[in-house]
Amino acid sequence: MGLIKLDDPVSRIKSVGDRWTTKLKNLGIETIRDLLYHFPVRYEDFSEMYKIGDLIPRQEATIQGIVEEIDSRRSWKRNLLITEATISDDSGSIRAVWFNQPYIKTILRPGTLANFSGRVSGSGEIPRTDGVNAGGYLSNPTYEPIRNEEVATKHTARIVPVYPETKGLTSKGLRNMVTIALENLVKIPEPIPLPILNGENLPGINQAIQNIHFPPKLDDATDAKRRFAFENLFLLQVYNLKQKIHLARSASIDLPTDLPYVKSLVDRLPFPLTFSQKKSLWEILKDTGKKTPMNRLLQGDVGSGKTVVAAIAALNAVKAGHQVAFMAPTSILAAQHYNTFLRLFGDFTGGVALVTSGESEVFYGHDLTSKVSKQQVIGEIKRNKIKIAIGTHALIQKEVNFPDVALVIVDEQHRFGVKQRDELLKNKSAGLVPHFLSMSATPIPRTLSLTLFGDLDLSVISEMPKNRKKIITKVVTPEERKNTYAFIRDEIKSGRQTFVICPRIDKPDETPDILWQVKAVKEEYRKLSQDIFPDLKTAMLHGKMKMNEKEKTMKDFLDRKIDILVSTSVIEVGIDVPNASIIMIEGADRFGLAQLYQFRGRVGRGEHQSYCFLLTDSESKKANQRLKTIEKAKSGFELAEYDLKMRGPGEFLGQSQTGMPDLAMKALQNPDLIKRTRELAFETLKEDVHLKKYPALRVRLSLFEKNIHWE
Ligand code: ADP
Ligand code: MG
């Protein structure tokens, strides 16, 4: 096969054909690197071989035996095909049972010698005599026929990795691919500078990548994990520091604060700004007044009023004579910001535009709003006639060119990658880097933000506007479900709308119904629209829908064409539906508290009393207690701190949002390691800011940059 490189596509592995590449893609795996960095979630220790006669109930173990007989039958439960085998060695015999894997019969023919690793289920003792015991059996054991005793086993009789799986691709399949990749892999260059590697007593990259998949001992896996956690934190610190150094050496346009103007804008608002809005605004204005680029994150709970702060900063930039680009992750959000802007600052005549893939509009003051073609708007931006452009990705397309952009604002930036951010920054006027403000409602504890976003300065809006009604929040027990539906019906009858959130889109196919308890959008949608509320208008929304379908559904909901919207967490991002008064969250115990808090922020945005119902089937006292903290919580940050303590950072940030592997997320809780990696990053860059001495680190860093999507 020849040697495999990290950047090769997974199809380099001989057995990986088209069928597998699509499945691997579902797991985000396209290259050998992706495959090898798809780390196990846990290991099963089957390293010790047992005699069948020595097995005890509930133990996990590997046995080696001969298949005596094997047969399949349908069970009375729908769609469950049971394959049952009898396996024996010289100490006894035991049954093995598999579900819905009929092909096993063709692999484990009677007479086959194989290893079986798994858990002994059932209650009965296993006799030391030959008879098969009806009580104890191996449930869904991993099997591996032994053809040649010399070849090392992959699935049994060792410490076995268990991976995040996808439909049709199990850990077993992944193990096979990882084994081939590791056997043929070109040596990976070490990205961590050697003195640091040795000083911290970490295993080298090649050993670590081998051991994280197939550790000879569990301790070896622990060392490998420690290494990768360190590597990620170290890269993060190097990245942050490099950004800081880079920005400190760049120049941008200074936008002096026109105090009387800013004051007049604030005075004209229909509400007083909160203290932290004023403070944040002041921090931003101070930064944008400098000749070095601002790089600031404005954090605040949903509804805390970030937009108005950003809008005033934008107006000040225009007053100083320059352009502003304001980006949102979806068309709906962009339109919402545009409308908010017009509502609050309707007498602005400098030229505001809305630019999304679907619509474009310009506004030069009252009565001058017009729908114009996108081409026209782009032309106006280019001719510097539009001073504030509000839009989506459409703003960073090649043909859009700001001749004089001095400030870039990005809302809910966890939807934007670093690359996109760079594209915005490419719009340099005379080599000057625009000031950059990102806004986020993701409540991240301060300690964590400082590490994750060490390259950004932080402004926090920590209080809500005073006029808000408190959202009535309640943990609902299964017995109260019926009453809750009745309540929802009443609210809808009086004109309101409801969100229903489920943890998943779909039920995984391979799971028998009886074992599946998590609420899924598709199922819940069917149930609500057909059985519970057949007379109401129900729709669903989830991440697998196309962008325009999602936007259409959201727009219909906004236009009150839909009463109940059943959705996954995709509605998390800041959409304002003032008429929605109820959010009902299924499987609430499966979400992070901060995330639940975010969901709740979807309601209570209009004048109506709003409600948040948290449903859980979990009987665990701890889970319910955890949910109850939301009833009392004053801010998302408070909950984030609580969750950080209880569950660790990965749980409320989620890997997909940060691009950080779980183990690095866990390491974020380790203040000593954070401090240590920062020091080491500083030392490394102080000596060699362009990392000339460390080409492997440079390469690794550029990959790292590509993969971070956090805000
Ligand atoms: P977010 O921080 O979630 O982006 P928005 O900026 O969308 O919040 O603000 C939510 C709503 O609150 C908007 O309608 C906005 O006009 C209003 N708002 C903002 N600041 C205040 C305030 N200080 N007092 C009252 N209402 C405010
Ligand atoms: Mg917002």
Image (tube, grey):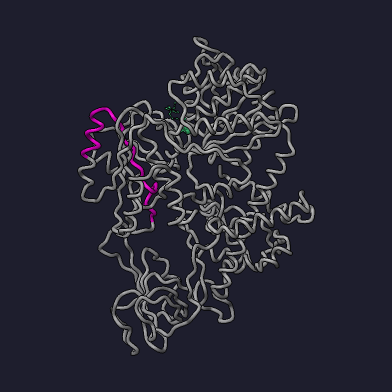
Between 683 and 535, the one lying in front of the other is 683
Q: Position of residue 314 (x, y in %)?
A: 58, 25
- Magenta span covers which residues? 486-509
Q: Position of residue 90 (x, y in %)?
A: 41, 89
In the image, taking residue 329 as reference, residue 571 lies left or right, namely left
Ligand 1 image position (quadrant): top left
Q: Residue furthest top?
A: 367
Query: Which image quadrant: the N terminus?
Result: bottom right
- Residue sitting at 54 percent across and 25 percent down? 311
**Above-or-below relation of 7 to 471:** below
In the image, taking residue 73 as reference, residue 408 lies left or right, namely right
The magenta stretch spans residue 499: yes
**Above-or-below relation of 18 to 283:** below
In the image, taking residue 243 as reference, residue 478 lies left or right, namely left
- Residue sitting at 59 percent across and 19 percent down? 377
Q: Position of residue 627 (x, y in %)?
A: 34, 50
Q: Position of residue 150 (x, y in %)?
A: 59, 81
Between 255 and 333, the one lying in front of the other is 255
Q: How many marks?
A: 0
Whether residue 506 can be seen here = yes
